[in-house]
Image (cartoon, helix red, strand yellow):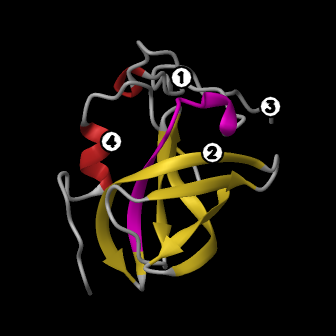
């Protein structure tokens, strides 16, 4: 297994950093196109997580940090210019790649992002009340 790393070394570490906008873990179909060496490429893949400034995904094609690529949302045909800002681990021939949009584009994903002050550790979980009486059964 080959590993290409730049700081930070995993997508999990990226999500732990302070973000300009909340990152949402979601698998969304995208098409990434650009050039690898001198050869043009177009790859269909899925995101690992997204935010208003870009995403993390896995790509089979080899890209370099600082490289410019285009991302297309296949549901809307919207295209955004991006820059590769992160290269993570390679597993099964695909590398974790983080890209940043040239301009923030929260509407590119067509999802609602949590508010800036949202803390995922404080989200409410369904309450279970162990002291609550069990439903009575009639015999």
Res 138 label: 3
Q: Classify mark 3: residues with Cα within 10 Å, few (<14), some (14-19) or many (20+).
A: few
Mark 4 or 2 closer to N-term? 4
| Gap in angstroms between the C-alphas marked 4 and 1 | 14 Å
Instruction: Answer above or below: position of 26 versus 6.
Output: above
| Gap in angstroms between the C-alphas marked 1 and 3 | 46 Å
Instruction: Kindly check if marks 4 and 1 are in contact, taking CB atoms under 8 A apart as contact.
Output: no
List the residue tagged with mark 1.
114
| Gap in angstroms between the C-alphas marked 4 and 2 | 22 Å
Instruction: Answer above or below: position of 89 versus 139.
Output: below
In the image, taking residue 58 as reference, residue 20 lies left or right, namely: left
Residue 52 at x, y = what percent?
53, 31
Instruction: Kindly check if marks 4 and 3 are in contact, taking CB atoms under 8 A apart as contact.
Output: no
Residue at screen point 44% across, 15% down:
116
Magenta span of residues:
95-108
> SS at mark 2?
strand
Res 24 label: none
Mark 3 or 2 closer to N-term? 2
């Amino acid at each position: 297994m080959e590993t290409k790393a730049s700081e930070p070394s995993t997508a999990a570490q990226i999500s732990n950093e302070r973000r300009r906008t909340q990152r949402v873990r979601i698998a969304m179909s995208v098409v990434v196109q650009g050039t690898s060496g001198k050869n043009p490429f177009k790859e269909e893949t899925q995101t690992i997580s997204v935010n208003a400034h870009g995403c993390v995904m896995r790509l089979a094609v080899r890209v370099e940090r600082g490289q410019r690529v285009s991302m297309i949302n296949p549901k809307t045909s919207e295209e955004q210019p991006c820059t590769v800002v992160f290269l993570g681990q390679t597993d099964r021939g695909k590398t974790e790649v983080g890209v940043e949009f040239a301009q923030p584009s929260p509407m590119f994903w067509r999802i609602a992002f949590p508010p800036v002050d949202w803390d995922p550790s404080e989200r409410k979980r369904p309450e279970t009340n162990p002291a609550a009486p069990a439903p009575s059964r009639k015999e």
